[in-house]
Image: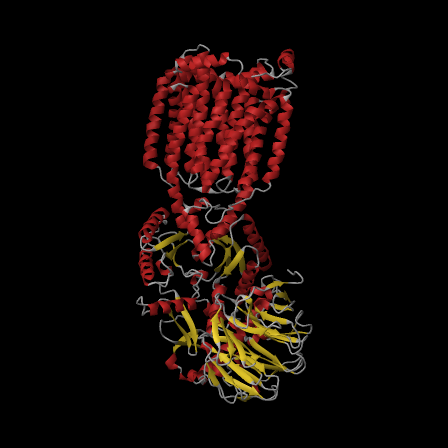
Amino acid sequence: MSLYPGRKTKLHKDWNGQFSERKGEQSPNVQTGKRSPALQAVQHCVMAAGLMLAAVSQAADAKTTEPKFAKMSNMASKSLLLDVTRAAESPRMVTVGDRGHILFSDDNGISWNQAKVPTIQMLTAVYFPSDKVGYAVGHDAIILKTSDGGESWERVYDDLGLEAPLLDVWFDDVNTGIALGAYGTILQTRNGGKDWVDIRDRINNEEEFHYNAIAGDGDGNVYIAGEAGILFHSPDSGRTWNTLESPYEGSLFGVSAGQGEVLIHGLRGNVFRSTDQGKSWRAMSSGTGETLFGSAVMGNGKSILVGTSGSFVSGKAGQWSAVNRSDRVSLSALAPGADGNIVVVGQGGIHRMSPTGEVLKKSTSTHPEQEQ
Amino acid sequence: MSSNHFSTEPILERFIFKNRMLICLLFLLATVFLSWKMVTGLRVDASFQKMIPLKHPYIQNMLNNMESGSSGNTIRIAVSNNNGDIFDAEYMEVLKNLNDEVFFLPGVDRSKLKSLWTPSVRWTQVTEEGFNGGPVIPQTYDGTQASLEELRQNILRSGQVGQLVANDFGSSIISAPLFERDPETGKALDYRGLSDKLEELREKYNEQGVSIHIVGIAKVFGDLFDGVKAIVMFFVMAIAITAVLLFLYSRCLRSTLVPLFTSLVAVVWQIGLLATFGYGLDLYSVLVPFLIFAIGVSHGVQIINSVGVEAAAGADKLTAARRAFRSLYIPGMVALASDAIGFLTLLIIEIQVIQDLAITASIGVAAIILTNLVLLPVLMSFAGSSEKSVARIRAKQQDEGGIWSLLSNFAHPKVVPVSVVIAILGFGFGIYKAQDLKIGDLDPGAPEFHPDSRYNMDNLFLTSNYSTSADQFVVMVTTGVENCSTYPVMEAIDRYMWRMENVEGVQKAISLVTVSKRVITGLNEGNIKWQTLSRNPYVLNSSVSNATQLFNSDCSMAPVVLYLDDHKAETLERVVAATKDFAEANNNDDMQFLLATGNSGIEAATNEVIGKAQAEMLIWVYFVVSVLCLLTFRSLRAVFCIVIPLGLTSVLCQALMAYLGIGVKVATLPVIALGVGIGVDYGIYIYSRLESYLKQGMPLQEAYHKTLQITGKAVTFTGMTLAIGVGTWIFSPLKFQADMGILLTFMFIWNMIGAIWLLPALARFFIKSENLEGSSEKKSETEGKLTTA
């Protein structure tokens, strides 16, 4: 891949699976958020080839002894972490990330313990429908479940052959939920993670764009946002899905819903807000040109968004002010702690910040039992 | 002197003194020839490979995988703006000019040169249409405030802050990878020439409102050579001080000039012989002429002393010289042979600079045997001691008391137990303290230089303003051809990197996995949820296609670069141990994690070689010295008397090293061999006299008193000349030479003290059973009371 100065380029996957460049003006389909059928056919071929080769590489894997459990490390809290959440009706915060790292904190993110996790794959998202039961998803389409508030985890699903990561997870209650991710992958469980059903037919995403995020507002409305601006709404806690008209053709990386509003956000500081369950959207000025990956609706019309280059956007919707952390790390997600401060995760691990974006004291991590 | 040696003396002695003119002529011819060789053939050698243990498996691994370009031999030039930050049109202009000049420096791999001004340094941004990117310096750059602001944005997007741009934006780096060999001519890189050119650039640009900080192995070598130049001055200084002391000692101009002259002849011979055999002088062997000169003078003093004593006894010039030769040529030969063999034990250390040091020093000692044991007495037989000095010696001999009388109490039965107890305490203290002795270099930066040297200040500037460490430990991951970017390999490298980042002292790890993850993230619109390896081989392959510096040309080797906090031995040992653990668990037929290269990898190998060689070398040097003493004196007691004081000095020297924070390293490891090899001289001279008096039936203390009268002055003087010869190194701009100077000075002085103080005590301790019985009557008279000065 080489980039030419001053020329905008679009990458697509060609027949060889090589990434090559296309001039922006030559791919009008992308501008409208649609992929050409030819492109899609190519993508399927790549995936098929990938599947075969994955089988080969799995065979090779068998020779090496892959550790089953994530390594206990004092540095886990400083490694790449991708999602953070606060369990329902509990002060406990849980964060997940690279190398199977899951950490939990009971003091609003000041100190963290590393959980015992049966994978070393990257985990991308975590969700706690109750104070004890939680789910985490990641690459290799791994789904993990905890029943003890995040201290120990079991593997309930994986699919290495899919070669697609799961990118987000949402649960209506402890038993019913949805995990979704790359290439239109969307799975549903109704029995607490025992069985997972592929429900890609229920959503109109023929191009198999990535689903990047899913969020519910607690009143039965659930939203999915993804690649190339795709946007879906379920009025019935995920049973049926309808396609929303997207205000944006670029990729959306996050969605937050609650308190009567929905926020979607993505590339180059684009944020859109809806107060009518996604029927209409208003483009908001975020005050930054950075890609925004994570968000949280804080109530009273306030919200916080985080993204690349340490960008931190906060305040009342429409009057946001943006700052950049001096370390300019990419931030992936945030969760408010019970103390009013914010735990932000991303590159460099866990960062504690004030609701206005001031950097607070570093978090520390320990792990209860040493394991080699 | 044992009588069995005696029979050979007259023949040699007669031959030499009957053909004095012939001998002089032969020496003249040899000296002229070797001077010519020295002037025409001497070269200064600084091959990097000579400094490293070539046979060590790490280094073998490194050499086998040399092509990969991870040699780390890069010059980094930080250009700091004296007037503000880098977003300054004038600064950028100066940076551009310097960048252009560096581009044309000989040995620079121009295709890999990196700075803000090279097109390879780019920024990227993800947009709705894909990537947007370009060189960090906008193509429309015109030095206006607007384009400088654009530059600032580009730099922030490029991820170069902490790499090419200082964390505080006060400076930026020009990074110039070097060819070890010129790809066109095949000639080895001229470090010295490059370093000189860099200095010219530094001088030129320092006047233009910027300050220049240069680090890199090539600069280290350049600065080392500058340090070597200073050594010449120390040599002149050492000669001058020695000359003054010699005169004060002998009060005779002839006795001063002749040993100085013969010692310098030995130095000329040594260097001339080196040139003849094709050796060069390197950073370590440049110190050998000092040693040779000092050893030469110290043996010369023994001869001068003896000649003076004989003259005082009434002998004429020739007879005095002959007698001096007769009495000293055996102990002199033994002492010098033990010097040479002591040096040769250094050959077991498989690092070429040390081996060369051993050989050059041995050659020098061989030269001394001829110049100072043969030429010197011959010359003295012509010159003779001056009347005044002979009279002085005579006067001194009349004086029964004096310092020697006082010192002879070291052989007194009441003093001996105290001495022995002190010696045992000394051993205990030394051994206890020496436990803190560390292997390897302990100071940050380039350990060759003082902490406040310009190089180390430059290094400090870089490490404190950039997020990179100067201490790089490189592990090579070898695979089948074209397999370096397969998932199982990359996955293992990824796990290895994380494992190592968890090791105390490792700051971060970089490999093709780092690049792969970055590229895959980029291909997924910068979403860090994709910042991991892909199982899809096409994705994985293409993700590393631009990371050519992080795998070799046929993708069968990928280096993992670990940036360390420091290069202390413990840090390196931790890294090595963790890597070995990981390799053991993960190496298979398709993939091996191999130690190690990078400056810290080489240092780890060097430390291992030195740690292993240290004990081995000590055993050898003591074994050899003991055997030589045994052969000479035919007595185990003699061996104990001579070797135990040396042992005490060695142990105390190690304690001193621990106290001063000097590690055992390439520079200091030879010190103990040199110290023991040379230090044994005192013991040999004293013991051979003492033994001869004891054989005459004298009681110990009287024999020792006589010994001191004859040889004590020469021995103390020897200690001083040796100490002065190496003591001047303490002021060397090169830290390792200063370290060697401190330690050798300590060893020479302590060995002298040990010989004068402890040797007689041990003699009483070991010899009392036999030799002393025979003279019991006398003993009861003289040894019952302490002699007073």
Q: Nearer the viewer, residue A194 or B41?
A: A194
Please say if B696 is above or below B735: above
Identified at 40% across, 59% down, the residue is B170
Q: Residue furthest top?
A: B314
Please say if B111 is above or below B605: below
Residue A175: x, y in percent?
Answer: 67, 81
Please say if A305 is above or below B353: below
- Classify residue B11 by image quadrant: top left
Residue A47: x, y in percent?
Answer: 51, 77
* B434 to the left or right of B97: right
* B476 to the left or right of A66: left
Quadrant of the frame with the C terminus of chain A: bottom right
- Classify residue A131 by image quadrant: bottom right
Residue B538: x, y in percent?
Answer: 48, 71
Q: Nearer the viewer, residue B298 or A221?
A: A221
Look at the image and tell me whether residue B700 can be seen: yes
Label total for image: 0
Q: How is the image coloured?
A: secondary structure
Residue B623: x, y in percent?
Answer: 57, 32
Look at the image and tell me whether residue B589 can be seen: no
- Classify residue A300 by image quadrant: bottom right
Q: Nearer the viewer, residue B105 or B84?
A: B84
Please say if B421 is above or below B63: above
Quadrant of the frame with the N terminus of chain A: bottom left
